[in-house]
Image (spheres, helix red, strand yellow):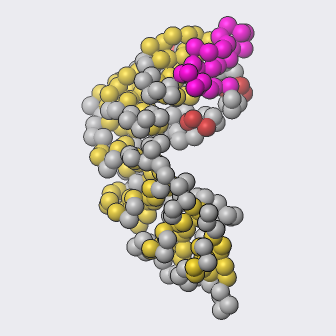
Amino acid sequence: KHYAAKCSGAGGGSFVVVDGKKGLDYQQVMENGGWSAQMIGFTPDSSEFYYVAQTSQFFLVVNDEESDGYPQTMLPVVGGEKRIGFIANMGAVSFVVIDGNATKTANATNLGFSPDGSRHAYLVNSPRSIMCVDDNVQTGIMQTPFTRTTEPQSANVDYLFSPDSKHIAYTGYMAADSAKRGMIVDGALVGNPKAGLVITHPMFTPDSKHLFWVEPDEANGANNANNAWLVVDGVRTEEFTVTYALDKDPGNWQMSPEGGFVGYDDHAGFRGSR
C-alpha cells in the first residue's frame, strides 16, 4: 500500500519521497551498497519507513522524525512489527537507542530483538563479554559467542531468544568460577560441557519449552570433526559422528514444526527426527 523512492536534489544531496511526500534534504541517504533493509526500508507492518542519512552527522530518520546526530553511521535493527533500534558509538561510550529512547553504556554491540519485539539484548564492554538483557546487565556472567554455524536459526552467534520471546540462551561462564561454563538460559547455567565452550546449533523447540544444541565428545577436545553429542535441556541424548564440511552445510540441522531435531551421521547411526 506504500512506496518510497530515494531521490537526488537538483543542487546535489539526497532526499526520500514516501507516498508522494518529500522528506528532509541530506548530503546523502545511506544504501549500504544497495537498497537494503539494513539501512533503509519499511517495518514489517508497513507503518514506518526508516533510513540512515548524513549531513555533518548521521541520523536515523523514521517517518521524517530525526534521531539525535552521531559522528558515526549506525545500522538499524528492526524487531517485531515496528520496533526500531540502533547502537551509536562515540569512542568508548555507546548509546543504545530504541524507539527514540537512548541508554548510555560502554562499548555496546550486537543489538537484537526477540521475535515479537517485546524484548531486546546487546553486549557491553570490550571485548564483547557481558550480556545486557532489556537494559539489565547480567552481572557475574561473562558471555562468549556460540561457535559459528551457518543455519539461519543461529545467525546471531551471541545469543538466541526463544520463539515466545520469554527466554534467552547464550554461552558463557560465571565470573566467580570460570569452571562453571556452558549454556546459560535466563541467567542460569543449564549445560556444562566438559570440552569447554564448543557449543553449536542452538535451537529452541517451537513451543519454547526445550533447547537443543550440539557439543563435542570430550575425548576429542575442542575438535567437533569426530564424535559429538545431541544435548536436550542440558542432558546428552545421542552420540553421533560428524564431519566439518557437513556440519557447516545449511539444512543439515533443522527444527521441525513439531519440535523434532533433524540431524545426520556419516555412518547413518543418527538420522531423522528426535
Q: Residue at x 63, y 70 (%)?
A: 4
Left/right placement of residue 192 relative to residue 2 reads left
Q: Residue at x 42, y 18 (%)?
A: 234
What range is drawn magenta here? 252-274
Query: Would you say residue 269 sits in the magenta stretch?
Result: yes
- Main secondary structure along the magenta-highlighted residues: loop
* Res. 199 visible in picture: no
Query: Would you say residue 85 sits in the magenta stretch?
Result: no
Left/right placement of residue 165 relative to residue 246 reads left
The image quadrant of residue 28 is: bottom right
- Name the quadrant of the N terminus: bottom right
252 versus 159 height, above or below? above
Marker count (numbered)? 0
Q: Position of residue 109 (x, y in %)?
A: 45, 52
Q: Position of residue 172 (x, y in %)?
A: 40, 33
Closer-to-camera residue (99/86): 99
Q: Position of residue 142 (x, y in %)?
A: 36, 37
* Res. 180 visible in picture: yes
Left/right placement of residue 231 relative to residue 131 reads right
Q: Residue at x 62, y 12 (%)?
A: 240
- Name the quadrant of the C terminus: top right
